[in-house]
């Protein structure tokens, strides 16, 4: 270190350059120190958002997969509804507006909001069937109807999870272009 200082003292014209590069290094370190927490927070938010997307998909997929092996009864439907409610609340609490690049139709923020609505739709289906059943176990026909109803939100959740383009529903219309009832 002493040799470097002696060499710099012998070459006065280089002292200004050494100060310049030292200042640049100090600014670069300061920049990294200031922005590193923001970058870390951004990565953490993105990872949490992806986890929530996966959780929303899994809660629907779990019910769809297992409902093929048993006939739902009111308690099992209410338990499924509680699982979906927990996922809906988690998705609703997430600070979507803190995500980077949260604009656009397939942004992570929009996918999270879409997943929340999709899980809510599936929950409404299970609640309705639980109300209709009363104290009895679902019939084979009701089980298939529920699986068919849950299949639609499952496909939507799958598309949102994989960031696939989601088509808008096409409502049937008559010859005049008016929706049919």
Image: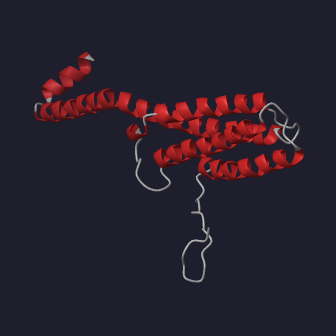
Q: Is residue 58 visible?
A: no
Residue sitting farthest toward the bottom? 175
Residue at image coords 60%, 68%: 171
User: Where does the C terminus fall, quadrant-wise?
Assistant: bottom right
Colour logic: secondary structure
What is the total number of numbered labels drawn onto the structure image?
A: 0
Image position, residue 106 (x, y; %): 50, 54
Residue at image coords 71%, 37%: 131
In the figure, is residue 106 to the left or right of 81?
A: left
Residue sitting farthest toward the left? 12
Residue at image coords 53%, 35%: 91
- Whether 129 is drawn above or below 175: the answer is above
In the figure, is residue 52 to the left or right of 99?
A: right
Image position, residue 159 (x, y; %): 63, 53
Image position, residue 144 (x, y; %): 83, 49
In the figure, is residue 100 to the left or right of 57?
A: left
- Whether 14 is drawn above or below 157: the answer is above
User: Where does the N terminus fall, quadrant-wise?
Assistant: top left
Seen from the viewer's position, the closer of residues 98 and 75 is 75
Q: Is residue 117 visible?
A: yes
Seen from the viewer's position, the closer of residues 15 and 35 is 35
Image position, residue 167 (x, y; %): 59, 63
- Name the image quarter holding residue 19: top left
Seen from the viewer's position, the closer of residues 92 and 105 is 92
- Name the image quarter holding residue 173: bottom right
Seen from the viewer's position, the closer of residues 84 and 126 is 126
């Amino acid at each position: 270190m002493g040799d470097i200082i002696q060499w710099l003292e012998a070459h006065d014209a280089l002292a200004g350059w050494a100060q310049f590069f030292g200042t640049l290094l100090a600014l670069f370190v300061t920049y990294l120190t200031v922005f590193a927490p923001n970058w870390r927070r951004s990565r953490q938010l993105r990872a949490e958002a992806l986890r929530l997307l996966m959780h929303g998909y899994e809660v629907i997929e779990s019910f769809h997969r297992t409902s093929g092996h048993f006939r739902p009864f009111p308690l099992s439907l209410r338990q499924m509804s509680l699982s979906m409610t927990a996922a809906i609340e988690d998705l609703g609490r997430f600070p979507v507006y803190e995500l980077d690049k949260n604009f656009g139709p397939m942004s992570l923020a929009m996918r999270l909001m879409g997943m929340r609505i999709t899980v809510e739709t599936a929950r409404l289906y299970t609640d309705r069937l639980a109300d209709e059943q009363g104290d009895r176990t679902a019939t084979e026909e009701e089980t298939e109807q529920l699986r068919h109803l849950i299949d639609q939100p499952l496909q939507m959740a799958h598309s949102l999870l994989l960031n696939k383009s989601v088509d808008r529903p096409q409502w049937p219309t008559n010859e005049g272009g008016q929706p049919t009832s």
